[in-house]
Structure formats: structure tokens, C-alpha cells
Amino acid sequence: MNHRKRLLRLQSWLKESRLDGLLVTHLPNIRYLTGFTGSSAALLVSTTGSFFFTDGRYKAQANVEVTGAKILVAQTSPLSALADWLKGSVDRSPARKSKSTGLPLIGIELEVISAGARDRLALLLKGRARLKATNALVETARMIKDAEEIVRIRRAAKLGDSLFAVALEKIRPGIPEVEVAAEMEHRARRGGAEGMAFPTILASGPRSALIHGRASQARIPYRGFVVCDFGVILAGYCSDRTRTLHVGKPNVEAKDLYFSVLESQQAAIEAVRPGITAAEVDVAARRVLQKRKLDRYFTHSTGHGLGLEIHEAPRLAAGQKQKLEPGMVITIEPGAYLPGKWGVRIEDMVLVTSSGCEVLSPDSKELVVI
Ligand code: ZN
Ligand code: ZN
């Protein structure tokens, strides 16, 4: 990963935004910019250089992983150490001594910094720097994946998506959902996954109407839908896929529901191309369900970006004006859920290309009946 290039690009954005620096506290953003995978860090990217703070536990790891930033090991929390260092650096700066310029303007990631940390920071830097809320600068860069990230995402998708075959081997009436999930997760780890991208969803029978029905002790019924939503983290990158299958012979109504959701998903995938807004893709999915009077059962957004995190920008939902661009990786996952009865969701990851999109690790989406 070319972290130096990412830092340089951010530095040029800082100049455009008239900021003297950006204080990065969101760990996935720090990982994106420096390569650090630990859980305690703060990063200051200034127009002149980048300064990475961690605590003593991560000194050796930082020396191996961090590129493009100067590493400083904190005795206190990385954020307090960074604030102290910033205070000192402002005091030492000749511009400050001559009072020829205003106070440096430092951007903070308002969406992720806690109110307490922001207040402490403001107090520490009082009279030396001003804090300014920034609007997802690093998240915006992260939306467009570079070639190396796309390679990793493809690998994650391939491993993650292969777990559905494991589910198919394991799902039988009477088996607890957690047992199926356990087998899938075991295979993921053996395939090299660092972990699951989120708790595996295995929702059978009436539980399939729960959008986030994590695998429970409930037993697979003799007849009904099973929603399987699963993903891995491989080399830092997430995968995400949902397949819905039917145990026992599906009736006409069940088939109608399944194929309506599938048609909705296909319509949304066909809509994906550069220049279209995230909201327009959402409309494409919803329109199909509307025609079948199922839209009121589609109660979540159509999809989301993913990469280092399972949910990233852009969000494919009503009102989202973000235009899609080549290099974005998003999910397309419409569903319909009839409370207390059943639900269906079908989800794939797609890569936006210059001419449209590519479904990652495509497979058959005919209704599987066990
Ligand atoms: Zn998803
Ligand atoms: Zn999912």
C-alpha cells in the first residue's frame, strides 16, 4: 500500500481547505494513511509532515508497520501526547513568536472524536491553535479503492462468498442456527480470515423477518426461509454477501417474494454506473418492489460502501446525492420482511467500473431449496 502517496494527497487537500493540519483519530483512517493495525494511535497530518503517536505497547509494531509518518511513543494516551506536542510545536514556531499570523487551524474528525476528548483538546490548545470540524476528508478518499485494495477486496469476497457452500452443507431441519454459523466461521479462519466482518446472520423461519437476526439457538425449521448474511476480514478488507434459501418446498407466495427481491437486486445492479447518484440506485431497487406492493416491507437502505470497514461511504439510500465513481466498491442488498412471517434478502458486492459495474464473485441466485 502506498501510504506516502495517500498522505501527500491529504496534505494537498488540507491546503485547499485552508487547514494547517488534520488530527486523525479514527483507527481505520489511521490504518489507511499509515498502515498501522493496532488499537491505540493518533495521527497529525500537517502541511509540512505527518506525526504518528501510539503508546508503549505498540512501539515495536509501529516501527514495522507505519510508513510516511514520524513515530512518537506516548507516555500518556496518544491523543494527549499529540496535543502536548502540538502545543510545544506552536510555541517553538517563529511565526508564533513574531505574532505575524493567526492561530493554526487544525481539523478534527467530529463524527468520531468523543465530546470529552474534543473539550480536553480545545482546553489544552487554547490560545495556540483553533479546532475546526472537518467533513469526512479521509473517508472521502477511502471511497475510491486503488488497484492494491481492489485485489484484496476480491480475495476477501472470494473467501467470504465461499462460506455459503458451507452453510448449504450444514443447514438441515432441527440444527441450531449457531451451529451453522460456527462451521462457517471456522472455515473462514482456516481460509486465512482475521475474523468475521460482523456477527454472522443466520435467521430462519419467522426470524428471517429480522433484518439483523444474528445466529441464535433457534433450530432450522422444516419449512421456511433462511437468511444467511456473512462476511470475512482478509488482509484488512471486508466482504459481505447475503443469500436466502428455503427449507422444504416453497409455496407460490414464497417464490413470488424471493423472485421479487431478486428482480429488485438485478435492477439496482443494472443501474450502477459512474455518474449515477447513490439515491438513484436505491430508487431502482425500490421501484421493482413498489410494483409488487412490497416496498413497505423493504425497510433498510439498498447498500453501502465497504473496504477497511464493513460500512463505509457511500450509503445507497434516499436523498444520497453522492455520485458513483469507478473504483468504488458497494453492496446491493434489497430485502423484504413481513414481521412474524418471513423475510428475504439478496446481497452482492459490486465494483463500479468505467462502463458500469462488475459483480464480485458472481454465482447463481436461483432459489436454493433444501
Ligand atoms: Zn451489507
Ligand atoms: Zn450483509
Image (spheres, grey):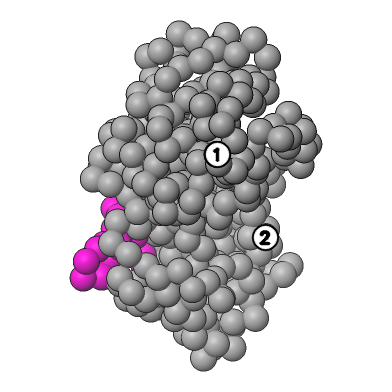
Q: Quadrant of residue 162?
A: top left
Within 10 Å of the Cα at label 1, are there few (<14), some (14-19), or many (20+) other Cα atoms? few
Residue 171 image offset from top left, x and y in percent: 51, 47
**Observer-nearest of 107 and 34:** 107
Q: Amino acid at mark 2?
A: Leu
Instruction: Tell whether position 354 is magenta.
Output: yes
| Helix, strand or loop at mark 2 | loop
Seen from the viewer's position, the closer of residues 175 and 192 is 192
Task: Say which residue appears at 40% left-offset and 13% top-offset.
Answer: 63
Give the mark toward the camera: 2 or 1: 1
- Identify which residue, 351 or 200, lies in the foreground: 351
Vertical relation: 163 (above or below) 354: above
Q: Label 2 to label 1, Cα distance in Å?
A: 61 Å
Would residue 258 be visible to someone looking at this image? no
Q: Mark 1 sits on what residue? A: 100
Depth check: give the residue in front, 41 or 108.
Answer: 108
Magenta stretch bounds: 349-366
Residue at the image point whose x is 73% and y is 29% from the top: 124
Res. 4 image quadrant: top left
| Magenta span contains residue 105 | no
Determine if the C-beta at disc 1 is less than 8 A from ligand 1.
no
Residue 164 percent across, percent down from the top left:
41, 48
Residue at label 2? 210
Horizontal side, residue 281 vs residue 250: left or right: left
Point 76% across, 42% down: residue: 115
Disc with the residue nearer the chain's start (2 vs 1):
1
Q: Kindly state the secondary structure of the residue where label 1 is placed.
A: loop
Q: What is the three-letter code of the residue carrying label 1?
A: Ser
